[in-house]
Image (cartoon, helix red, strand yellow):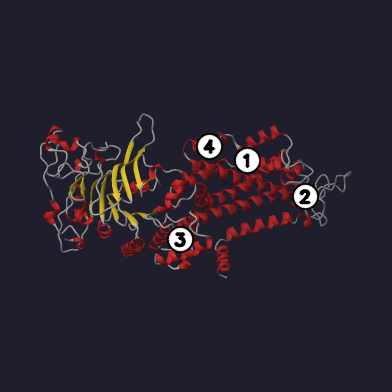
Amino acid sequence: MTTSAREPRKTARDGEPLLSVRNLTKAFASRKRLFRKAEVVYAVNDVSFDVHDGETLAIVGESGCGKTTTGRSILRLIEPTSGEIKFAGQDVAALKGSALRKMRREMQIIFQDPFSSLNPRMTVGAIIREGMLIHGLATRAEAEKRAGDLLEEVGLRAEYASRYPHEFSGGQRQRIGVARALSVQPRLIICDEPVSALDVSVQAQVINLLQDLQRDRNLTYIFIAHDLSVVEHIADRVAVMYLGKIVELAESEALFSQPLMPYTQALLSAAPVPDPARTRDRIVLQGDVPSPANLPTGCVFHPRCHHPARDEACAKIVPPLEEKETGHFVACIKQPPTMVDWAQQQSAGGTKPPERYLPLAALSPSHRSEGVQS
Amino acid sequence: MRNRATVATFFRSRPGMTLAAASLVVIIATAIAAPLLAPYDPVAQPDIVGGNITAPSAAHPLGTDQFSRDVLSRLLFGARVSLLVGIFATVVTVTVGTAYGLAAGYSGGIVDEVMMRLVDAFMSIPRVLLVLALVALWGQMSTTGLILLLGLTGWFQLSRLVRAEVLGARQTDYVASARALGAHDFRIAFRHVLPNVLPPIIVFATIGLGNVIVLEAGLSYLGFGIQPPAPSWGNMIRDGSELMTAAWWVSLFPGLAIVTTVMAVNALGESLRRSLGRSESRA
């Protein structure tokens, strides 16, 4: 199972990564029932990636692909089944008790649903102060002052501290959530679909706020999303997940201009382009996403793949996430170069040799929005 | 100023709740002021030889019982006992039930499983039978004993309710966020989970109060509760039970007192349930 353990090397950056995740796996066991074996669902399956100081790594994929579980496992809000999580050299996965609580200051989270993420029985001020008081970062009076400052920093008024969450709109609540995350001065923030529950007009405001904060405070983001236009706007690098695995990981520009994984190609071709004059050729996948309790053998994407060289080997060999171009990692044995050589593929039943397949190049640039054409 | 206005609107828009709450306030106030309001000593037997039962009159507005004691005075002092037992037993119930449910729901896993199966076992015995069995075991009962007995047999359902609510609250993002901020389990349980499961607990407590008052009256009626000559609504009904046709006033007035109190408590509980439920769905 762990053939894709090869470390995606850092590319344009020097120095140690801020966060380094290796072979992260989270398995959920369904309850045993009479006459039925307990099923094991791999929500996150052997995922490895690095996040560098100050960058934004986006994790994209459709619902149920494991992106939220990945984010929450890094924070230990969900206990990972196995794998290593290193933050600034410290092994987060091994921390316990008070050491873990201390560590939590460094990594925060912004939630998708601004309605369930704020305690309805606490004032906004109390919500923002809580983290400072837990970690002893401020006395009560200082915390009150700082909560007001934080509210202003996220574009709200300091007086709102005495109000309750239900008095605010979704966008305002999301700003309160941001202020709460900032209250403990973290270095890394996991943004778990922070704008997908908001109106489009408000989305842009919150995205801009996040970008301003990143610049001012030198924050590092893991940005979990399914909206590709948002990702293209905010991300430095993008990881694409499918059925619990990272199938492609590249610099944002490379990924959007030349996606190599057939799944990513389909995903990008499905993204809407706000231009009625352009016609689009979409790659339409066949079938549904397989049940994560019963994963396809070999490449998890092979039953739905549209790569012309797809063959028996794809159903047998688990494709390693390997570097096809500098900094561009793809899990596909049919996109050359690959370390699973042709002889190996043939012995696994392969009949079609690997070949570069770039269907989006033909329809380019119609599949992309204007921002990143290069 | 703004607060006073909201309180006024709150009650004006809920006439049922206002009436119930007001009646309860009156009942509790009379009980507290019983020594000032009662025209006679509730246990004095002025006509100990004749044992005259007198019908309601100017001197004895609610009449006297077969021991020539003033029914009105006994009713007022009886209210103290009935309400005292009811309220403190409910406090015991709510404290134990909430703590137990919170512990079970928050721990989860095998602890939760064991704790809940234990509750299932207790719940399989009807409360009245359980209480009677314990009384038989215990013998004579002080007021404190009665409070504990009634309080400790009433929390099973509440603990299940609290546990279910806690399981729900535990899954929310604000609890995840508190954990991500580094909050201790204790803090999460008491600052984040408990305040959000409070509304159903309040409703349960109100309705439970009515049940306990009836149960205490029943016990005293059977002679297991408050012991004579101290008055309680239950043993007053018992005193009059054999004289129902001859001296209806001896049993009727304590009976009415129980009905009124329990109805007020239940109406309050019901309207609380509705208005708390409403604010919940709005939030």
Q: Quadrant of the N terminus of chain A?
A: top left
Q: Is residue B135 left or right of residue A16?
A: right
- Residue density around tag 1, few if under 14, some if 14–19, many if 20 or more, within 10 Å: some
Whole-percent x, y for residue A295 in the image: 26, 38
- Residue density around tag 3, few if under 14, some if 14–19, many if 20 or more, within 10 Å: some
Q: Say whether disc 4 or disc 1 marks the residue closer to the N-terminus.
A: 4
State the SS at label 3. Answer: helix
State the SS at label 2. Answer: helix
Q: Which mark is residue A358?
A: none
Q: Are marks 2 and 4 in contact (CB under 8 Å)?
A: no
Q: Is residue A61 left or right of residue A92?
A: left
Give the residue drawn at x 73%, y 44%. Answer: B237
Q: Label 1, on which residue?
A: B152
Residue kind at label 2, given as amino acid type: Arg
Distance from label 3 to label 2 (Cα)? 50 Å
Residue kind at label 4, given as amino acid type: Met
Q: Which marked residue is nearer to the observer: mark 3 or mark 2?
A: 3
- In the rendered image, the residue lying farthest to the front is A15
Q: Which marked residue is nearer to the observer: mark 2 or mark 1?
A: 1
Q: Nearer the viewer, residue A79 or A199?
A: A79
Residue kind at label 1, given as amino acid type: Leu
State the SS at label 4. Answer: helix
Disc 2 and disc 1 on one polypeptide chain: yes
Q: Label 2, on which residue?
A: B74
**What is the chain letter for disc 1?**
B
Distance from label 3 to label 4 (Cα)? 35 Å
Q: Is residue A171 left or right of residue B267?
A: left
Disc 3 and disc 4 on one polypeptide chain: no
